[in-house]
Amino acid sequence: MKGIIFTEFLEMVENHFSVEVADQIIEQNDLDSKGAYTSVGNYDKQELIKLITSLSECVNLPVGVLLKEYGKYLLSHFLIYYPQFFQDLTTTFDFLDTIDRHVHVEVKKLYRDADLPSFQTKRLSSTKMQMFYHSSNPFALLAEGLIEGAANHFGENIHVNSDISENHQVATFNLTLVD
């Protein structure tokens, strides 16, 4: 898993909780990386799972809540780091349509070894979309947070109805734009 996912997660922990909490969750786990991540490095996804689980226990919030919040946080930072992926887009649905066809194509050019999730979309009407998520990582709720973060960015009220597999690697998100 790309290091940016780790560095941004720890930054979120520091910003939303504290540097001490970030240090604590690193120290609580036997991490091969010792918690020293670079944004371009590659790391075992199990380390992120351990960190999220430890954070959940430390701050007494469910893992699912933390994953969704992290997805929103990550989207807000992608807006800063990769504004070109949002350029000329005016809606959440437009953005979600571009993830596999544009965003991930560009990411693969830079990081051929990146293990990216699949985001396939199907527009059902001007106010309804289905998004199918598939990943080797158990982060469907993080993906839901990304959707919510995109809706926040575009100033849209989108109701998300999720059907997530038990292993959190596959999900169908039924999205409805609400006035």
Image (cartoon, grey):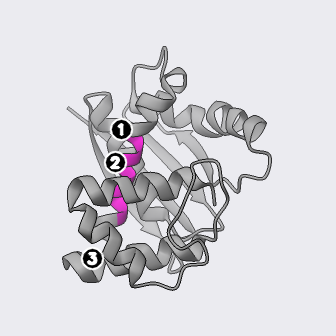
Labels 2 and 1 touching (C-beta < 8 A):
yes
Q: Residue at x 41, y 58 (%)?
A: 9
Which numbered circle lies on residue 62? 3
Residue position marked by numbered label 2 in the rendering: 72
Sequence-earlier tag: 2 or 3: 3
SS at badge 2? helix
Q: Nearer the viewer, residue 115 or 134?
A: 115
Label 3 packing within 10 angstroms: few (<14), some (14-19), many (20+): few
Name which residue type carries label 2: Lys
Q: Nearer the viewer, residue 76 or 147?
A: 76
Q: Is residue 74 covered in magenta?
A: yes
Q: Residue at x 22, y 62 (%)?
A: 18
Relative to 103, 141 lies left or right? left
Find the magenta span and give its range.
67-76
Relative to 54, 106 lies left or right? right
Q: CA distance from mark 2 to mark 3?
A: 16 Å
Labels 1 and 3 touching (C-beta < 8 A):
no
In this rendering, the count of numbered labels is 3
Q: Is residue 3 covered in magenta?
A: no
SS at badge 3? loop
Which numbered circle lies on residue 76? 1
Q: CA distance from mark 2 to mark 1?
A: 6 Å
Q: Main secondary structure of the magenta part?
A: helix
Q: Residue at x 65, y 40 (%)?
A: 100
Residue 54 spot, x, y in % from top left: 35, 80
* Residue 161 seen anywhere in this rendered image of the structure: no
